[in-house]
Amino acid sequence: MSINTEAKIEDLYHLPENCKAEIVNGKLVLMSPTGFLPGRASGEIYVSLREYERRTKSGYALPDNVGFIVNLPNRRSFSPDAAFYTGKPTGGKFLDGAPIFAAEVRSENDYGEAAEKDMAAKRRDYFAAGTLVVWDVDVLKEEVIRVYRASNPEQPQLYSRGELAEAEPAMPGWLMPVDNLFV
């Protein structure tokens, strides 16, 4: 006899050090560490968000591995690669609610039909939870940023090298050179 137990928010607090996970469909979904270029890209996005935070004082820039607790039928948490949050700080606890902006940087295993379906489902969840803009950042293959908006979630705007990517309407006036994502 097997006992099926649903993952709880408390389970996220007890992951091994340097582990990252989300709760999806009642299960704890572990995420593997990333490689150099995707890790560097998420860091560059965070640095740019931090500059925006200091300039506008309109929210909080957050790096990789920060937990956001949501209450969707099929999802209880997010852990984006970089994010901007306008809610209340929670000290050492996970943040309550979704960020207004989330960046998801593709790693080696984020390609193929199954990965595309998973990423599209995650974007739908972000928008259902209140996120306004989601970046799908591909530094390994196509070298582009796809900017998805809650107002038109199936039609991304594409930014390539040599261009400035943005996150309107979530972060008015914030621009980031796509070239900053690369060495």
Image (spheres, rainbow, N blue to C red):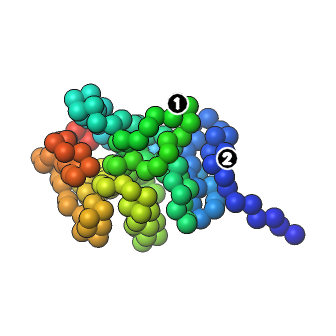
Residue 119 falls in image quadrant? bottom left
- Residue furthest top as drawn: 54
| Tag shown at residue 124 | none
Q: Name the residue beneath numbered marker 2.
A: 11
Label 2 secondary element: helix
Type of amino acid at the residue the image marks with label 1:
Gly
Q: What crowding class fits label 1: few (fewer than 14 Cα within 10 Å), some (14-19), or many (20 or more)? A: few
Q: Which mark lies nearer to you, 1 or 2?
A: 1
- Taking the spot 19% from the left edge, 48% from the top edge, the residue there is 165
Residue 178: tell me if it is visible.
no
Looking at the picture, how far across and down is residue 25, in whole percent?
A: 59, 65
Q: What crowding class fits label 2: few (fewer than 14 Cα within 10 Å), some (14-19), or many (20 or more)? A: few
Looking at the picture, how far across and down is residue 63, in whole percent?
A: 41, 37
Q: Name the residue beneath numbered marker 1.
A: 91
Distance of label 1 from label 2 (alpha carbons): 18 Å
Q: Is residue 97 left or right of residue 82?
A: right
Looking at the picture, how far across and down is residue 81, in whole percent?
A: 41, 45
